[in-house]
Image (tube, rainbow, N blue to C red):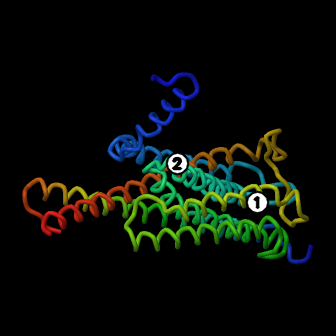
Amino acid sequence: MQSTGPARVAVLDRKSMHAYANPTRFLAIARPLTPWLTGLGLLLILIGCVAGLTMVPGDYKQGETARILYVHVPAAWLGMGGWTSLAIAGLVQLVWRHPLSGIAARAVAVPGMMFTALCLITGSIWGKPTWGTWWEWDGRMTSMLVLLFLYAGFIALTAGEDAQRGGGSLSRGAAIYAVVGAVNIPIINRSVVWWNSLHQGPSITLGGSSIDGALLWPLGLTLLGFSLLFGAIVLMRMRAIIAENRVAARMRRLADEEG
Amino acid sequence: MDGVITGSGQWSYVAAAYAMTALVSALVLWRSWRAMRTAEARSDALRKEQRGGRLVI
């Protein structure tokens, strides 16, 4: 009997999702996309940073240090966005066992951790001249530090699995870890509202921005530029994992033939 | 506030934040690119060797 209605839609969705499960099909898209994302990302970052350093005025309260915004905010956005995508990949792995989801999760982990570390470093550098301290154990900074440790834990967990059973799909434990770790993302987002903090409240919300338009536009460029660069780095790492898996598979096949 | 830095002294903090961002981003980009190139070159070489009927690792 032919499936109809919602069941048929679900089957079609699953089919279209699995159409890109084939690494060869994925690589046909990823190969031309990687240099474009890298080049465009670097260009936008360069324009945004030059504009942020030379073309916009200093903030009336914080002075020149407000220019750190143009690198700090993209780093925070990508640190949190990285774990969100890692959790989605973990969920897809758990529910549909999509072959590329585990590879995507592994590929996101290192750049996600790097941008989380950058967020903490640039935030600390911004904090010293503004608050008079490098670090404060408040809600925002502590929850961001927890995110850094979550990334480190995920990398250690998947590296251990790699050593045991080779790269590729994510284990059930690592996928659950990725999904459960996502609980920290809304905590980071709401931390400045829930707890007293040296960190300023939310400046950009769905309702608008408290940052003046004259200071805001370079942030759009650096946000987009760093996001494209992040995408390029993830694609590079996915391609590396796929290539390593292919080498391992060929070597196993060869060993079987000889044995 | 005690310890707050104003005026031209702020620029060194701005420069440090941008330098750290450039350094760490470039490092991760370079390492990812190199890992991709190395892995794909090895995979391609292995495939070609297998097609040619001989295998050199």
Residue A108 in picture, x, y percent from top left: 52, 58
Q: Are marks 1 and 2 in contact (CB under 8 Å)?
A: no
Front residue (pair A115, B13): A115
Q: Is residue A165 above or below residue A87?
A: below
Task: From the image, tell me which residue sits under label 2.
Answer: A41
Task: From the image, tell me which residue sits under label 1.
Answer: A188
Q: Residue at 72%, 70% (x, y): give it.
A: A125
Distance CA(mark 1)–CA(mark 2): 26 Å
Residue farthest to the left, as pictured: B53
Could you say which quadrant of the image residue A193 lies in? bottom right
Q: Residue at 54%, 64% (x, y): give it.
A: A174
Residue B43 in picture, x, y percent from top left: 25, 58
Front residue (pair B2, B43): B43
Chain that bears disc 1: A
Could you say which quadrant of the image residue B34 lies in? bottom left
Q: Is residue A85 above or below residue A132?
A: above
Whether residue A99 is visible to the viewer of this picture, yes or no, is: yes
Q: Earlier in the sequence, mark 1 or mark 2?
A: 2
Q: Residue at 79%, 40% (x, y): give it.
A: A206
Q: Quadrant of the N terminus of chain A?
A: top left
Q: Is residue A116 above or below residue A205?
A: below
Front residue (pair A221, A203): A203
Amino acid under label 1?
Answer: Ile
Chain that bears disc 2: A
Crowding at dot 1, Cα within 10 Å, few <14 / some 14-19 / many 20+, comes out as many
